[in-house]
Each structure stands twice: as C-alpha cells, then as structure tokens.
Amino acid sequence: MTMSQRTERVDELLRQEIGAILARDVSDPRIGFATVTEVETAADLQHAKVWVSVIGQPAERHETLAALGRAMPFVRRQLGSRLRLRRIPELHLRLDDSAERGTRVLHLLHELEEGKVPDDAAPVAETLPTPVVRLPREGETLEVVGEAAAIEPDRPTSRPSMSVDVRAAGRRSDPIDLRPWASAVPEAVVARIRGARRVLAVGHESPDADTLGATLGVCRIVEALGGTADAVCSDPVPPLYGFMPGIEQVRTDPAPDAGYDLVVVSDCGTLDRVGAVRERHRDLFERLPRVVIDHHASNAVAAEADWVEPQSAATCEMVALLAVRLGVPLTAADGALAASLMAGIVMDTATFAHPNATPRTLEVAAALLEAGAPLADISRRLYRTKPDAQLRLFGRVLASLGRRLDGRLVWSTLRDADLVATGALPAHSEGIIDLLAQAELAEVAILLKEAGSATRLSVRTRPGGVDATVLTAAWGGGGHARAAGATVPLAVDEATGPVLAEAERLIAAVAR
Ligand SMILES: [Mn+2]
C-alpha cells in the first residue's frame, strides 16, 4: 500500500469517526448544523486538517465554528480510545465554504442566463439551499475565470461590482496557516478575552486605521466567542476611515451601566494615549481587568496581560494572531474582521512599503486577503484618495519647491494663505513632506509650515546620510533618523534662512 493510499484511508476513517463523535458525544448547544466534509492528514500523520461545512446565519455559524474548535481536544482523546492508530494526529479545524461559494457561482450564472444584472444587495441567502454569507463589498470586482469569463455582463459603472472568487478553488488545498505565529499570543491575554462577556475595546485619541481596526477587530472576536463589545475612542472618527466596517459603532464614551468585565486597550504606546475618555471614566478604567495589545517600542507597560511586540508592523497584525489563537475564523462577521485588520496593516506599513513589514506581516495579510479583505480598495482609500482641496494645496506647495546644493537640499513652505487659497484644512498638509522627500537627489527635504507666530518644521532625510534628529535638535525637536520635526520660534520668513543654513552644513559632511 502506498503512502498516499494509506493516508487516504486514514482520512476517511477519521472523517467518519469525528462526525460520529460530534453527533453522539459532544453536547454543546452552540454547535449547530455542522458536517465534517473531509479530513486531510499530513504524510507524517502528525497533523490533520478537519474541514467542516456549517449551515446557519452568520452569527450561528461563527458560534458553531468556535464551539467545534473548543471540542477538538476532546474529539482527539475520543479518537485515541476508539481507533487503533499508533498516533492520532493533531486536529486543525478548517471552514469548508466550497458549498456556499459554489452555490453563489451557480446563482450568479443562473441570473446572467436569465439576462438579469446580478443584484449585489439581494439577500441571496434566503432563496438558496445553502446560506451565503459573504456579500461583496464596494470596490470588489467580478473575477470569473475559465468558461464563465466570457459572459461577464456590461454593468453600469455606478453599481458596486460583484465578487465571485473562483480562484478559491486553489485555496482549498493549501490555506495559509497562521497557527505557528499565533503561539506568540500570551496565555494571560487569551484567558482574559476568552473569559470576558462584556468588553470595552479602546483605541488611542486622534484615531488612525490601526487603532480603529484593532479595536473593531477585538469587538468582532469577542462577538464570535459569544460575548458583546463596545468600541470606544476619545475623539470622533475622521471621515477618511468611514469605509471601515462597523466604524459607525465607535463611540466616544463607554455605554452607561454596561456591566463591562474587561477593557482591551489597542495601539496605545502609553495608557495616556487613550486620551480624555480615560479621564472622564477613571473609575471604570481603574476597576476593570485590562488587556493591552500594542506594537510601540516605547511602551513600558508590564502588567500580566500586557502584550507589546515592537517587531509587529501594526497592532492589527497582532489582533489577527489573537483571532487565530482563539479559534475565531478570519472570515468572521461577514468579512468585517478581516477588512478591519487589513486596514490597520495597510495604514501602518503604507501598503507594505515601510521597512516595518516583515514576512509575518505579509503572511498575516495574505491570510486576511484569503478571508476576503479588500486589500486594493483599502490601500486606495487610505493612500491614494484625497479631497480636491488637498490636491490643490499639494500643487501650490510643490510649485514653490526650492533647491540648493544641486538638489541635495529641497524645501518648500506652507502658509495659512495657501490653505485659504485652496480651501484646504490644516490636516490636509499631511503627506506633503513625503512628496518633497521623493526628490531624486535630496539628502534632506524640509517643509516649513506657518504655525501662528512660529514655524513647524518637518524633515525627511536619505538613508545613510544626515540624521534628521540632529537637524531638528537645534530647535529642541525630535523624531527618528529619517523623519523628524521641530518648532522654530520665528515666522516662516525669518526661520527659513537659519534652518536651510544648518541643513546645508550637515549635508556638506555627507560623502556619497
Ligand atoms: Mn499602530
């Protein structure tokens, strides 16, 4: 008997036995209609993937899957006493969604045959034998390969397009497995979140996509485990992040008398970063058991359930591993979990362009993409979408670009008059310095920004050259070697001379 015949027979035996054990011996009311569709044992018989198909509404499906995950150690012990196998492989639960994907494709093809334009918003699930939970998100495209590709209809461009990812067929045999990374999640964090029923999930003030994605991600995880959670941020959410699923639930204060039993603080380098909401509800924040999830190197917290990983590109990268560790599928909440977490990773890596992106970051992102996160759409919204007024402002600032030392120093200025002329807001100056820093020959790029009677400096420098903090230190500023800032107590016109002179002096010492 060949190796593959042997594992095939083991697979079938395991499939039948696991199904029988679940039906007879596991009485968890949260396990709904689940079918073990396939078992894939690795050649060395150490591990086996157990594919289950789950029927029901999304919340029920997630609950069923989580409960099945918890039952797997019991199932494995039962197998040990029932089967005469030298070793019972470790069982790894996998959601088999091929039935619903298949149904979705058939339904689409049927509609196209009838000459209809597929209606994205229709609750297809109700008319189909198998519930379909993954509705397409705005910006996704119709990707039907093979024969079906020929019948893609002309659709009005204003409609959100429909996603049918039949490439999922290739995914089935080799899904991205994050479990080796998930062992990084501290046990105390796992225990507190698993034991919580009513969670207050908090991000930092002036929220960005990483703190929001992590906070929303924690909420989706708690919900998938059967609890409830509120997302809270001291400041209102900027419109830029309005596309994130569930963002409308983010509140500026905890719900009164909610009976919270855990606070989870995400992406805050210090607890002060939580901001005013912590002052407003000091009793609550001091009383509740706490979990901290963060990736700031400066974070000095050291309580039992504080999880700080400076090597993580984003807090959302860590929350994805938390989900995996807790047995929550990344497809949870109709894709909301994966989309929220991807937004944070894209934000903090500038779509994998910053040096903080590691192989683990990419692997986590790949798993989120596999779970349906609309990566391209998120990246476009976070990094390649700007209000017209902001573009006009960029135009003005770029048009007044100055250069010295044959282009090794470039700079520009931004005055209140530029904001007035373009209708831009002060926040729209974000990103201009990074454009200046794209100047081909620049060792140092400087933006001098009017700030009342003073001037705000933003500095970017080329790797291996001038240390930006040395330049900004002359005015008491700080930052990183490649990106730093300072406030000069002079008006823009007076500040420009001394700042450029100091930059020239530092550039002169750089030999290339
Ligand atoms: Mn972050």
Image (cartoon, rainbow, N blue to C red):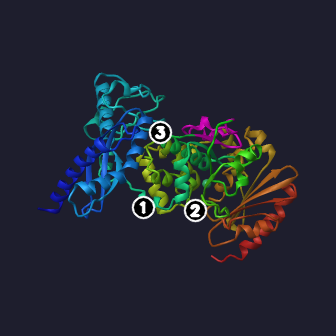
Q: CA distance from mark 1 to mark 2?
A: 16 Å
- Residue 99 in percent (x, y) is at 30, 37
* Upstream in sequence: badge 2 or badge 3: 2
How crowded pointer 1 is (Cα within 10 Å; few <14, some 14-19, many 20+) is rated as few
- Which kind of residue does numbered mark 2 sit on? Glu
The vertical placement of 125 against 467, above or below, is above
* Upstream in sequence: badge 1 or badge 2: 1
Nearest the eye: 227 or 296: 227
Ligand 1 within 8 angstroms of badge 2 C-beta = no
Residue that label 1 marks: 180
How crowded pointer 2 is (Cα within 10 Å; few <14, some 14-19, many 20+) is rated as some
- Which kind of residue does numbered mark 3 sit on? Ala
Q: Is residue 108 magenta?
A: no
Is 215 positioned to the left or the right of 371 in the image? right
Residue that label 2 marks: 309
State yes or no: discs 3 and 1 in contact (Cβ < 8 Å).
no
Q: CA distance from mark 3 to mark 1?
A: 24 Å
Is 157 positioned to the left or the right of 127 in the image? right
User: Which image quadrant: the N terminus?
Assistant: bottom left
Give the number of the disc on residue 333: 3
Is 333 positioned to the left or the right of 36 in the image? right
Q: CA distance from mark 2 to mark 3?
A: 26 Å
Type of secondary structure dominating the magenta stretch: loop
Quadrant of the picture in which ligand 1 is shown: bottom right
Nearest the eye: 496 or 252: 252
Boundaries of the magenta span? 229-256
User: In which quarter of the view is residue 121 placed?
Assistant: top left
Q: Residue at x 66, y 40 (%)?
A: 237
